[in-house]
Amino acid sequence: RRQPALSSREISSSRKRRRTLPVDGSAMCGDCVEKEYPNRGNTCLENGSFLLNFTGCAVCSKRDFMLITNKSLREEDGEEIVTYDHLCKNCHHVIAKHEYTFSIMDEFQEYTMLCMLCGKAEDTISILPDDPRQMTLLF
Ligand SMILES: [Zn+2]
Ligand SMILES: [Zn+2]
Ligand SMILES: [Zn+2]
């Protein structure tokens, strides 16, 4: 897990808008995965691939390691969004587009993941420090 730099960040108290599934579906075929957007509970991947859900490339029918390309990080309304593509190592077919977001709402960090291959997940954890020394500094 990444630790955000709290000092330089405005903590917004506004609830963020709910995200909707990406509709651009253009490059994704959905035939390379066992199940589209499987529910992963609170397992949000910022990196890597959920290989268990990969049945093999629908184009070249190889089940090889995947490449990760087009990785980018942008910030929108105080929300950090990491996106990348899962690519077939053999024929460079785009297997899925991965989106990971990180934001701070009130005293919580919120993580989300949305990927046809890796699935969807949401995690919310308190940013109140567990360290008792930091606790005493707060009060
Ligand atoms: Zn495919
Ligand atoms: Zn392929
Ligand atoms: Zn993914």
Image (cartoon, rainbow, N blue to C red):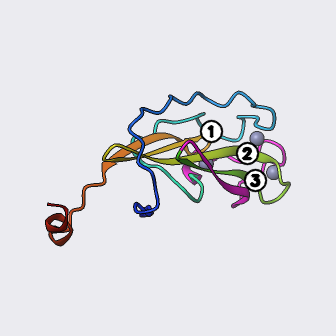
Mark 2–mark 1 Cα distance, whole angstroms, equals 8 Å
Residue sitting at x 76%, y 35%: 29
Q: Name the N-terminal-most of marks 2 and 1.
A: 2
Q: Which residue is mark 3?
A: 87
Which numbered marker is on residue 116?
1
Residue sitting at x 43%, y 41%: 122
- Which amino acid lies under the numbered mark 1 shown in the image of this protein? Met
Q: Name the N-terminal-most of marks 3 and 1.
A: 3
- Numbered range of the magenta stretch: 51-77
On the picture, is 3 further left or further right than 126? right
Under circle 3, the secondary element is strand
Q: Vertical placement of 71 versus 31: above or below? A: below
- Which amino acid lies under the numbered mark 3 shown in the image of this protein? Leu
Mark 3–mark 1 Cα distance, whole angstroms, equals 13 Å
Looking at this view, is 108 or 122 the one in front?
Answer: 108
Q: Which residue is mark 2?
A: 95
